[in-house]
Image (tube, rainbow, N blue to C red):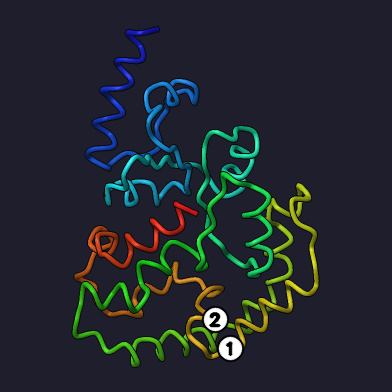
């Protein structure tokens, strides 16, 4: 057993250092032994390597399939943490879930990409960015797609694990709150529930890679604030 743990320790340390592979095939109990001094945070697969690359102190991010898998994992084991996208959760639902699960962290914006492509983050990498022009471009994209988003919103929300497992009650008030946020032209209001997953091209800064965007002071401060909740 000791030999096996040592092997895993060397392997995982290389993986974390290089941040190239982030879905670690190591038994959960072994991870707890190897990283007993670290906070283990399971997040959606593609985000783990980028989050590990910013060197958050005493924290190791581990890739998992999706928010359903992460939520079930942290429900069963209170010693580990989960970080999930907000998606179409209302402010009140997000607060309720955070109060119910002390080991759950939920992004304030729709998804990880919303942080990468936030104007404050982009401007730190690209100081000449015209923020007003950029935010107006995002607003136009939101307004041109909000009809399609609204049509699917009820089905999308009802598929969430939180309702299926009765962690949340499905309330019309929360649905109406999301609609109201999408209707708003206030950037910080609608940006919480408007996905930037496929909108990276809006910034037209193709030379800025995601690996650079996670290294900004703004991005690090946002992630640290969420992790330390």
> What separation in Å lies between label 1 and label 2 (alpha carbons)?
6 Å
Position in image of residue 129 (x %, y %): 24, 85
Position in image of residue 19 (x %, y %): 27, 42
Mark 1 and mark 2 lie on one chain; the one further toward the N terminus is: 1
- Element at label 2: helix
Q: Is residue 171 left or right of residue 98?
A: right
Asked which quadrant contains residue 215, the reply is bottom left
The residue labelled by disc 1 is 184
Position in image of residue 121 (x %, y %): 31, 72
Q: Is residue 56 above or below residue 194?
A: above
Q: Nearer the viewer, residue 229 or 122?
A: 229
Q: Residue 172, labelled with which disc?
A: none
Quadrant showing the N terminus? top left
Q: Is residue 60 above or below residue 56?
A: above
| Residue at position x 31%, y 22% in the image | 9
Q: Is residue 22 left or right of residue 55?
A: right
Q: Is residue 69 left or right of residue 122?
A: right
Asked which quadrant contains residue 71, the reply is top right
| Residue at position x 52%, y 67% in the image | 110
| Residue at position x 68%, y 63% in the image | 93
- Within-10-Å neighbours for mark 1: few <14, some 14–19, many 20+: some
The answer to whether the residue labelled 1 contacts the one labelled 2, judged by CB atoms less than 8 Å apart, is yes
- Within-10-Å neighbours for mark 2: few <14, some 14–19, many 20+: many
| Residue at position x 53%, y 73% in the image | 192
Position in image of residue 209 (x %, y %): 24, 64
Q: Is residue 182 above or below residue 174?
A: below
Q: Is residue 57 left or right of residue 180?
A: left
Q: Residue 190, labelled with which disc?
A: 2
């Amino acid at each position: 057993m000791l030999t096996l743990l040592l092997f895993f320790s060397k392997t995982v340390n290389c993986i974390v250092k290089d941040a190239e592979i982030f879905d670690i095939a190591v038994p959960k109990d072994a991870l707890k032994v190897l990283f007993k001094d670290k906070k283990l945070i399971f997040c959606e697969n593609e985000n783990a390597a980028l989050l590990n690359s910013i060197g958050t102190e005493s924290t190791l991010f581990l890739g998992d399939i999706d928010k359903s898998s992460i939520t079930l994992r942290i429900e069963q084991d209170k010693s580990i943490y989960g970080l999930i996208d907000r998606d179409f959760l209302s402010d009140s639902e997000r607060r309720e879930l955070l109060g119910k699960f002390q080991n759950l962290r939920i992004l304030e914006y729709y998804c990880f990409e919303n942080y990468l492509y936030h104007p404050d983050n982009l401007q730190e990498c690209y100081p000449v960015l015209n923020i007003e022009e950029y935010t107006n471009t995002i607003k136009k994209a939101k307004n041109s797609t909000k009809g399609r988003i609204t049509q699917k919103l009820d089905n999308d929300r009802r598929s969430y694990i939180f309702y299926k497992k009765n962690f949340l009650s499905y309330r019309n008030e929360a649905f109406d709150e999301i609609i109201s946020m999408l209707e708003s032209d206030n950037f910080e209001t609608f940006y919480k529930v408007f996905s930037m997953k496929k909108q990276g091209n809006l910034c037209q800064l193709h030379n800025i890679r995601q690996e650079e965007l996670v290294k900004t002071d703004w991005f690090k401060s946002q992630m640290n604030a969420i992790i330390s909740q």
